[in-house]
Structure formats: structure tokens, C-alpha cells
Amino acid sequence: MALLDNKYETVTLEQADDHILSIILDRPDAANAMNTQMGFDLREVYQHLYMDQEDWRCIILTGRGERAFCAGGDLKERNGMTDATWQRQHALFEQMVMNQMDCPVPIIAAVNGAAYGGGTEMVLACDFAYGSTNARFALTEVTLGIMPGAAGTQNLPRAVGVRRAKEIILTGAPFGADEAADWGMLNKVCEPDVLMDESLATARRIAGNAPISIRQAKKSMNVATQVDLKNGYNFEIEAYNRMVPTSDRLEGVLAFNEKRKANFKGE
């Protein structure tokens, strides 16, 4: 079954443009907070994309409405949970965020409003992020007797540096879009009415490039943060060699010499 044929309770999938998938967190009455069902829905979407990209070449992840991207875990649902139920739910969220980070297709976060707790972690698990001027961020878990548990303690230091990450996580204090951009968490700050246009323009540039090249380059950059330089470079060469026998490589060189736009097919 094609991904767009699936219907989900908490997320809406739309084709934003040719080869561009929009994933909309769709619980606006709950500030798009992540409940158990959203964990199931997002996990299924990312698992599907891991197995079959269906020629999707870029993804934009955003929230429904102007108020919130994602307010984090749904604390109303969590109120009174037993330890066992909490841990089962969190195991689901762990799988979801790992599936998100393993998604072969590049993901751009378009942060349209507040992204707190798990919402901030969801942004950090994307490949990069654009934010509205009214975007707000916080990792408030230590104020609730827990700590970030959706890779926040891993992805935030990689985005903003260890010392800044410690300040953000240990205080739980909120910060705005301009600070997030200054610190390296956001790539661009946009006015609210052009956030999706700016995100889509970048997604179109990515989608116009060779899809195998994009996937292999993303994989190689992810490895770069995990291993030493020599082993990372060895991985890069293996990833590079995957493209030598592709028709897209031949098309790219031919298009350059013929002074035209390449027509990449992911083959």
C-alpha cells in the first residue's frame, strides 16, 4: 500500500510537491502533543519510508495550526500512569525517534510554534530545521522529575555544543527562535506566513538532486558523528562507490555537458 493511502489518527500526510512529503502533527486541540497513538502513527510512517521510499526525496515535518509544533509528551494521558505503562509507552517513543533518525529521506523541520520537551527532541532528530519567529523551545523534563529521553541528550550537544546543551537541559528554561538560530539549532528564522514557503523552496532544491546521492550523503554525514575520521572516510568511499554504476551519475554528467537540468530517476 502506498504511504498516502494510509490514514492515521494523529498525523496527516500530504504531497507538498513533486517528490516532497509533508508530515503534519495533527492534534491542534492538544497543542499537537505526542500521545501513545501518535507514537504508533509516526513509527509506522518512518518504518514504511525505511523499507520503501516510493520516490519521496524530501520530507517536511510540521505541526497543525499556528500555536504549536509539538508540546511534547501528552501529560494528560500520562497522569496517573503506572511505572510499567509509562515504560511501555516510552519504549514506543524510543522506537519512533530511532526510526525517524534512520529515515533515508532527508527531513526538514518547519517549526511553526512551540516545540517543548519531546517536540524539541523531534526537531533535533530532523536533518535540519527552519523556524517561525514565534517558535519557542525548551527541554523541561528535569522540572518534571525526568530527563530528555528521545535522544535529546545526544542530539542537542551535537547541534549547539556540550556547554550550551548542559545549560538548556539542566535549567529547563525556554528560548526563542533567534537564540536557537544563533546557537545552531535552527538553520533559518522565517516570518510565520512564509515558513512553509521557505521550507518548501529548500525541499525542492533537495528533491531536484539525485535521490541515491542524497540518501548516501545523508547516511555518510550521520556516520561522521559516530566514528573517527579514518573510519568515517572509509564509509564515505563505500557510499560514494554505490553511485558509480547508476544511470543518475551518467545523466548528471551528460546534463552538465549539454547545459540542461538533469532528470534524475533514482536509478
Image (spheres, grey):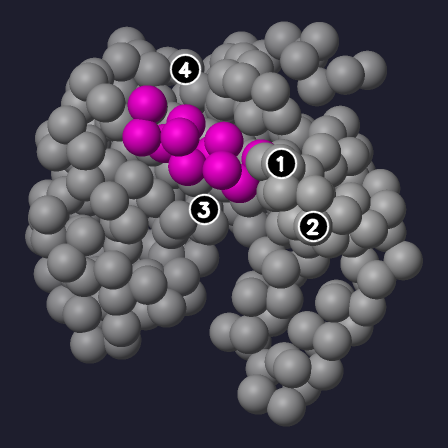
For mark 2, what is the residue? 257
Looking at this view, name the residue that lies furthest to the right: 245
Q: Secondary structure at mark 1?
A: loop
Q: Secondary structure at mark 2?
A: helix
Where residue 96 sits, quadrant-wise, is top right
Q: Residue 16 placed where, x, y %?
A: 50, 17
Of the pair 100 and 196, the residue shown nearer to us: 196
Which of label 4 and label 3 is nearer to you?
3
For mark 4, what is the residue? 26
Q: Secondary structure at mark 4?
A: loop
Where residue 13 sits, quadrant-wise, is top right
Q: Secondary structure at mark 3?
A: loop
First-in-chain label (3 vs 2): 3
Residue occupying the point 14% across, 43% down: 177
Looking at this view, name the residue that lies furthest to the front: 258
First-in-chain label (4 vs 3): 4
For mark 3, what is the residue? 126
Q: What's under tag 2, amino acid-wise? A: Asn
Q: Residue 193 placed where, x, y %?
A: 19, 18
For mark 1, what is the residue? 261
Contact check, label 1 and label 2, Cβ < 8 Å: no
